[in-house]
Image (tube, rainbow, N blue to C red):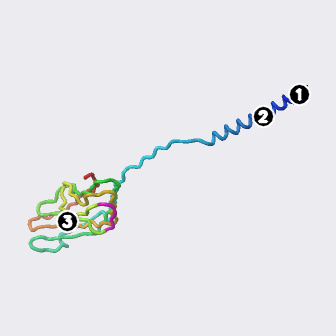
Amino acid sequence: MQHDLRSKRMFRYFSKMSAFAVSTCLSTMLIAATQTLTIEVGLMNETTLSGTTVLLDSSKGTYSNGVVEVFDSSATVDVTTSDSNQKFVASLNEDMPDGVELYLRVTGGRSSGTGNVQGAYSRLTSSTVDIITGMSNYTLDDGVLDFKMAVNDNAAPITQSYTLSLVITSG
């Protein structure tokens, strides 16, 4: 009988211990969880302008050989792309009137990566023109937008605003 009582006590003791062990294991299993994360990092193409209004007034230009030239270098641009084989292009919302030509080049600034800044002025029209080519993982900080307007003797007087679009595109 005593042996039986002792067995029952041992059984209850081990039952409680087993319940504690199972409880401990279950609580540990609930704490240890795993999760699968899917991360997507896209390509970065960014352009930032400062000095977004430029005034080109032919009355403040220099006259030579039948052409008045006016310059403005008050705007700067930052260009960044993490992609390969990109180019930075410019275009106007509409063409200049007869006798007026507008040009743009990017000068100065600090650059890293691969990219070819066109050193000469590019004539701006409603069609895109390359400003920086061959960009791969390229950054340009504080590049100066250097504008030149050329007005010949045949140009009619106008006052008009134009929109310049600067875009990073494949190329």
Image quadrant assignment for residue 110: bottom left
* Outermost front residue: 3
Which mark's residue is nearer the viewer, 1 or 3?
Answer: 1
Mark 2 closeness class: few <14, some 14–19, many ≥20 residues within 10 Å: few
**Does the segment drawn in magenta span residue 104?**
no
Please give the range of residues in magenta: 109-114
Give the secondary structure at mark 3: loop
Q: Position of residue 129 (x, y in %)?
A: 20, 57
Residue depicted at x 71% and y 37%: 23
What residue is disc 3 on?
121
Q: Which residue is mark 1?
A: 3
Q: Residue furthest top?
A: 1
Could you say which quadrant of the image residue 132 lies in?
bottom left
What residue is pinned by disc 2?
16
Kindly identify the residue that appears in the image at 26 percent across and 57 percent down: 134
Q: Amino acid at mark 1?
A: His
Give the mark nearer the N terminus: 2 vs 1.
Answer: 1
Q: Nearer the viewer, mark 2 or mark 1?
A: 1
Q: CA distance from mark 2 to mark 3?
A: 88 Å
Q: Are marks 2 and 3 in contact (CB under 8 Å)?
A: no
Q: Classify 10 Å Cα crowding around label 3: few (below 14), some (14-19), many (20 and above).
A: some
Image coordinates of residue 53 in percent, x first then y, are 28, 64
Q: Secondary structure at mark 1?
A: helix
Q: Residue at x 14, y 71 (%)?
A: 68
Q: Kindly identify the amino acid type of the residue bearing the numbered disc 3.
A: Tyr
Depth order, front residue of 10/51: 10
* Amino acid marked by disc 2: Lys
State whether the magenta stretch is mostly helix, strand or loop. strand
Q: Quadrant of the N terminus?
A: top right
Question: Where residue 157 appears, x then y in whole percent?
Answer: 14, 65
In the image, residue 55 above or below residue 136: below
Q: Is residue 100 left or right of residue 35?
A: left
